[in-house]
Amino acid sequence: MILNSLALAYLGDAVYELYVRKYLLNKNIVKVNELQKESVGFVSAKSQANFLNKMIDANFLTIDEINIVKRARNHKSHSSKSTDIITYKNSTGLEALIGYLYLEKNNARIDEIMNFILEG
C-alpha cells in the first residue's frame, strides 16, 4: 500500500502518541493533568522537530529513512498556527517515518527510534 506523506504522518502521529502514552504510564504517572503536561514535551511539533534533528545529527537514521522524512517535509501542506513552517514540516517528517515503518511492520525499528526519543 502506497500512501502520500501526509497520510503516513497521520498514521505515524497515532503510533507515536501511543508510544508516548505507554511510556508515561510506565513511569507511574496516573493523573490525567500530569500525563497531559508530560506528553507535551514529546508530542508538540517543536519537540518532534528537535528529536528528528537530534537523530539526524547523530547519524541515527538510514538513508532510506532520511528520504522518507525529506519527502514528507517537501510535501505541500498547510502550516500550523502554533509553530513556524519549518518546525511543522520537520515534525510531519518524523510522523511520516513512524507511519511508514508501521505499515512495513518494522516494529523493531520503531522501538529503536522511540527509545532514542523517550530515553534520550
Image: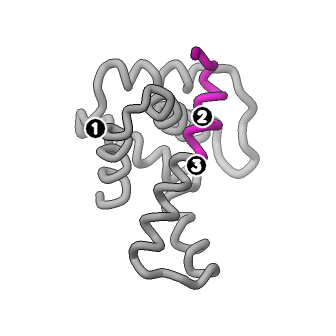
Q: Residue 45 — which label? A: 3
| Label 2 vs label 1, nearer the camera | 2
Return the residue at label 1. 57
Q: Residue at x 65, y 28 (%)?
A: 6
Q: Is residue 31 left or right of residue 102?
A: right
Answer above or below: position of 59 versus 39. above
User: In the rendered view, does 78 fall on the left or right side of 24?
Assistant: right
Q: Nearer the viewer, residue 32 or 70?
A: 32
Give, as a three-letter code, the residue at label 3.
Answer: Ala
How far apart are the alpha carbons under marks 2 and 3?
12 Å
Whether pointer 1 and pointer 3 mark residues with C-beta atoms closer than 8 Å, the reply is no
Residue 12, by quadrant, is: top right
The residue located at (44%, 26%) in the rendering is: 104
Q: Is tag 1's residue or tag 3's residue first in the polypeptide sequence? A: 3
Is 16 rendered above or below residue 5?
Answer: below
Residue 42, percent from left and from top: 49, 58
- Element type where label 3 sits in the image: helix
Q: Residue 33 at what x, y percent from top left?
A: 63, 81
